[in-house]
Image (spheres, grey):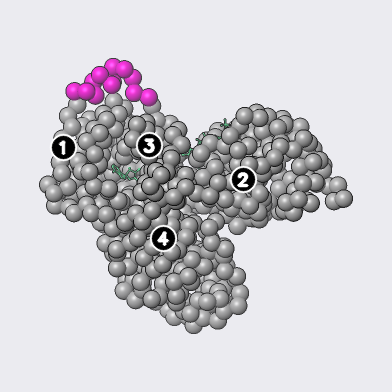
Amino acid sequence: MKIIVPVKRVVDYNVKVRVKSDGTGVETAGVKMSMNPFDEIAVEEAVRLKEKGVATEIVAVSLGVAACQETIRTALAMGADRGILVETDVDLQPLAVAKLLKAIVAKEDPKLVILGKQAIDDDMNATGQMLAALLGWPQGTFASKVVIEGDALTVTREVDGGLETLAMTLPAIITTDLRLNEPRYASLPNIMKARKKPIETVKPADLGVDPAPRLTVVSVAEPPKRQAGQKVGSVAELVQKLRTEAKVI
Amino acid sequence: MTSLVLLDHDGNAIKQPARSAVAAALKLGEVHVLVAGTNSAGAAAAAAKLPGVTKVLVADSPAVDHALAEPLAALLVALAPAYTHLFAASTAAGKNVMPRAAALLDAQPISDIAGVVDADTFIRPIYAGNALATVKSSDKIKVLTVRAASFDPIPADGGSAATETVSVADAPSISRFVSAELSKSERPELTAARVVISGGRGMQNGENFKLIEPIADKLGAAVGASRAAVDAGFVPNDYQVGQTGKIVAPELYVAVGISGAIQHLAGMKDSKVIVAINKDEEAPIFQVADYGLVADLFAALPELNAELDKPAE
Ligand SMILES: Cc1cc2nc3c(=O)[nH]c(=O)nc-3n(C[C@H](O)[C@H](O)[C@H](O)COP(=O)(O)OP(=O)(O)OC[C@H]3O[C@@H](n4cnc5c(N)ncnc54)[C@H](O)[C@@H]3O)c2cc1C
Ligand SMILES: Nc1ncnc2c1ncn2[C@@H]1O[C@H](COP(=O)(O)O)[C@@H](O)[C@H]1O
């Protein structure tokens, strides 16, 4: 079976982003970009399913500017077989991404799409659920364990109180949580090999989708800064201050 | 302008994050709420008492038990035409179902709002809370999830709303609940606690969390953790505080053996008072701590436990 893995190019998780002084967004020029960490977990899961003989082909899809090619290359180096770049300069929001992915699913006919649960830039946590809705497929979100037997999919999910297990039938959508697996690093030979793997480029118009954003960004601001605090010299001093100064215990 | 709020409940009571979602919705006008699932007469009665709520819709059907996303989204879509806004708390259940409903309504969900500006305009944190975006929606029906830590919950009592039963289409569900492994605790829930004490990788193992427990009990605190502590298996996944775990904003947050990575700060930096105990005085957690104690936690925690027994001077 074929698996599609959408991989988003985001500001690297180690970067502390800075809000632009004109309040239109955050500074991304000259900032290190990487694959969204949850998408690395998604690629890893797909590669493991291929290694187990459950999957036969993995297609990595990235949507956005031309540089998203690099993110696809990373997925190819981890073990994806080929890539599709949906190229656009439009600010893509989850509804548009879900519509574009739906069109790709219609062309590629996968049995499974594995997405990250959340992109660490927009923190939306929405695209997988939305794609599942548009396709009419079941969804196993925030997955920490995935078991596939034939057409039966069992997903263990990280929920507020602990873990929950759901059963569904393929085709289906999975979104990854942090503890699903530990993604591999691409080896140098695999990085070399990835250079030869094919990446097809399409435009939103080719897919018949209007990617215009539904949310207009009015402004982006710095959150309120916390006042610098104080160091206390002992546990006794700490407790005394919490009691009499902060009055929280 | 009327909003519908999907309530998280346990059959009997309405969860605190859901009361925060109602608080957010009340900023816009009239509010109806939805209680879904069988055996939820208690929750429906509790919902009717929420102050400000004018109608409780009850979907008493096994199809929507366990908040399964597919049937619950379909139900929300069926109810949506009567409303301008659909709300839920940013809980695991809310995050699972609301985007699904939004897609079916051809709307772009507005996730995890931290502020309401007007009926179309909302404030939401992006980049792990390092920026706050004000966004304006052009969708006819707005679908939102609410960051509970940013809205004081409305009280549990004081209202008297009318209750109405709604029917659920009994199409066979395409997913099925199998089982749940929920962690049991006598302590308050992380997102509702007045005090939270979290342990990090510095705790070294799960056994050592026993050093935190008596302190938590004395303070009526919930116990949380960093991702590193959860990944290492010290404590269950639902303890994780942070960008991709739970967002908390208690009166007092105590971080023990936690370095203070951006992703952790994202989940606790709106706490009223922050205490950090860390042996590394350079640890970034001290930059957000109101009170920082540079100490070995294995000495500090027993001392703290003993100190709390002493009467206040
Ligand atoms: C996509 C993504 C999402 C993430 N989401 C989250 C999230 O939601 N929540 C989260 O917490 N993290 C998250 N992280 C991980 C985050 O980046 C950090 O790795 C993590 O928070 C570190 O946990 P820690 O502070 O416990 O461990 P460390 O960074 O290893 O810090 C341990 C600290 O303990 C101190 N220490 C050690 N021994 C002692 C002692 N005896 N006494 C006192 N102090 C001691 C050390 O000085 C150190 O500061 C995420 C990362 C990614 C990539
Ligand atoms: N532009 C994009 N390109 C590729 N994948 C994306 C894109 N946007 C979102 N996704 C996928 O959807 C997931 C959730 O993103 P979000 O809903 O924005 O938090 C990500 O982890 C990706 O798997």
Q: In this image, A85 relative to A29: left or right?
A: left
Residue linked to disc 4: B122
Q: In this image, A151 relative to A219: left or right?
A: left
Ligand 2 image-quadrant field: top left
Residue A135 appears at what percent x and percent y?
24, 54
* Chain at tag 3: A
Which badge, 3 or 1, comes first in the chain's sequence? 3
Residue linked to disc 1: A201
B24 and B120: which one is in front? B120
Task: Give me the C-alpha separation between circle 3 and circle 2.
Answer: 27 Å
Tell me which amino acid carries mark 1: Thr
Which badge, 3 or 2, comes first in the chain's sequence? 3
Q: Is mark 3 within 8 Å of ligand 1?
A: no
Residue linked to disc 2: A227
Task: Give me the C-alpha separation between circle 1 and circle 2.
Answer: 49 Å
Do labels 1 and 2 touch, CB within 8 Å?
Answer: no
* Chain at tag 1: A
Closer to the eye: label 1 or 2:
2
Tell me which amino acid carries mark 3: Val
Q: In this image, B283 relative to B18: left or right?
A: right
Residue linked to disc 3: A11
Task: Give me the C-alpha separation between circle 4 and circle 2.
Answer: 26 Å
Residue A45 appears at what percent x and percent y?
35, 35
